[in-house]
Amino acid sequence: MSLSECLISEITAEFPSFRLVPKHGDRLSRLIDVALKLITFGAQDAYLTHYHTVLGHTLYVPRSWNSASDVERAIILRHERIHLRQRRRYGMPLMAFLYLLPFFPLGLAYGRARLEWEAYAETLRATAEYCGVEAAEAPQLRRQIVGRFCGGAYAWMWPFRGQVRKWFDRVLEDIRLEHDGSSNLTAQASTSPGPSGDSGETDG
């Protein structure tokens, strides 16, 4: 099984009703696309083509899912699994309330920002795990994620660019520490002797 297939299997074990549905041809997705274009004055015009959306236990995938690499799909699934767990933690009504209202639907959506901070932290961890810490530190990824919070794609959910950059740097620092700790443990394990300190030979 590929990496993404393994993750889908894990998510389905955790959420038995989980499924993937293409946005193309889905009536609800088309309606949401139109609504987002109106609400964001056209700033969010890629909902059907590039954005992945969890509603309930369903992951609605855009056309770009078909051309994404296995690793790209795995990173997306790690992000969306966080939203599934958030829904389980808060319940659907509270999750919807937090995502849409506090403090304001546009321009200062603190609830949505907090939910997405958690999910995008997982995006960075998955990127570091699958592609290396350097990939998570890439300026292009930083610009993309900061832009998601401060731009129209998420209805300007948290427009304080400096604060988002500080959050990004804190997450990266945690990832570096986790990576360094894991590397040190691996190095110690590879150089330490066996349990008895001998060559590991046994009597037949």
Image (tube, grey):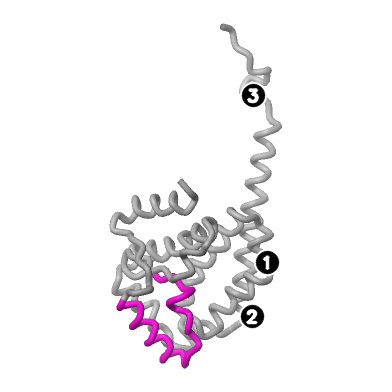
Which numbered disc covers residue 138? Answer: 1
Q: Residues within 10 Å of mark 2 (few under 14, many from 20)?
A: few
Q: Residues within 10 Å of mark 1 (few under 14, many from 20)?
A: few
Query: Is the residue 28 above or below the residue 173 in the image?
Result: below
Which numbered disc covers residue 44? Answer: none
Query: Is the residue 180 above or below the residue 56 in the image?
Result: above
Q: Are marks 1 and 3 in contact (CB under 8 Å)?
A: no
Residue name at image x 51 percent, y 64 percent: 67
Q: Are marks 2 and 1 in contact (CB under 8 Å)?
A: no
Q: Give percent across and percent down for residue 9.
A: 38, 50
Which residue is labeled 2 in the image?
162
Q: Quadrant of residue 196?
A: top right
Q: Amino acid at mark 1?
A: Ala
Q: Quadrant of the C terminus?
A: top right
Pair 1/3: label in front: 1
**Magenta range:** 27-53
Q: Is residue 131 left or right of residue 52?
A: right
Magenta span contains residue 41: yes
Pair 2/1: label in front: 1
Q: Nearer the viewer, residue 153 or 85?
A: 153
Q: Nearer the viewer, residue 54 or 83?
A: 54
Q: Quadrant of residue 52?
A: bottom left
Mark 3 secondary-structure assignment: loop
Magenta span contains residue 106: no
Which residue is labeled 3 in the image?
194
